[in-house]
Image (cartoon, helix red, strand yellow):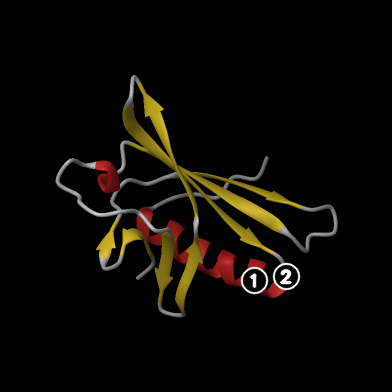
Amino acid sequence: MAAIQFFPGIDETVIPDIRMTRSRDGMTGQAIFLFEEPDALAPEMTGTIAGMFLVDEEGELVSREVRGKFVNGRASAIEAVYTWKTTEEFERFMRFAKRYAKRANLDFAQS
């Protein structure tokens, strides 16, 4: 089952808004995840967020590019960026994305 985690073994239940960009040649790109009021920022969560972990039956994809968004001095959102540099990495990310979308009952919209 596909899941997103900020702490190992703890699935994030908030479904993110995900935007994707790709280079003109399609080789490189990014997926930008925005989590509004995620579980990972709940007061009872202790520890430091070391990354975003995209976990499925193939293994784990990791992004260390994770930033908090603050409103009135309080963390309210997390933005994380997953970057790929090869066609193989993109295809692996898309397999995860399809599994995650199916699990979360999401649709893929291309603009």
23 shown above or below 56: above
> Is 94 in front, or is 46?
46
> Is 84 in front, or is 91?
84
Q: Image quadrant for the N terminus?
A: bottom left
Residue 80 position, x and y percent, is: 49, 48
> Is 33 in front, or is 2?
33
Mark 1 secondary-structure assignment: helix
Residue drawn where x is 41% and y is 73% of the image: 56
Asked if the residues shown at circle 1 and circle 2 are in contact, with their CB atoms under 8 angstroms apart, the answer is yes
Task: Please give the label number shown on residue 17.
Answer: none
Q: Residue furthest bottom?
A: 58
Q: Which residue is mark 2?
A: 86
Number of marks in picture: 2
Location of residue 51 by image quarter: bottom left
CA distance for labels 1 and 2:
5 Å
76 shown above or below 44: above
- Disc 1 packing (10 Å; few <14; some 14–19; many ≥20): some
Residue drawn where x is 37% and y is 46% of the image: 15
Q: Which residue is mark 1?
A: 89
66 shown above or below 68: below
Residue 99 position, x and y percent, is: 45, 66
Location of residue 82 by image quarter: bottom right
Residue 106 position, x and y percent, is: 44, 50
Q: Image quadrant for the C terminus?
A: top right
Q: Going by the image, does 106 lie left or right of 5? A: right
Residue drawn where x is 28% and y is 51% of the image: 13
Q: Please state which amino acid type lies under the numbered disc 2.
A: Thr
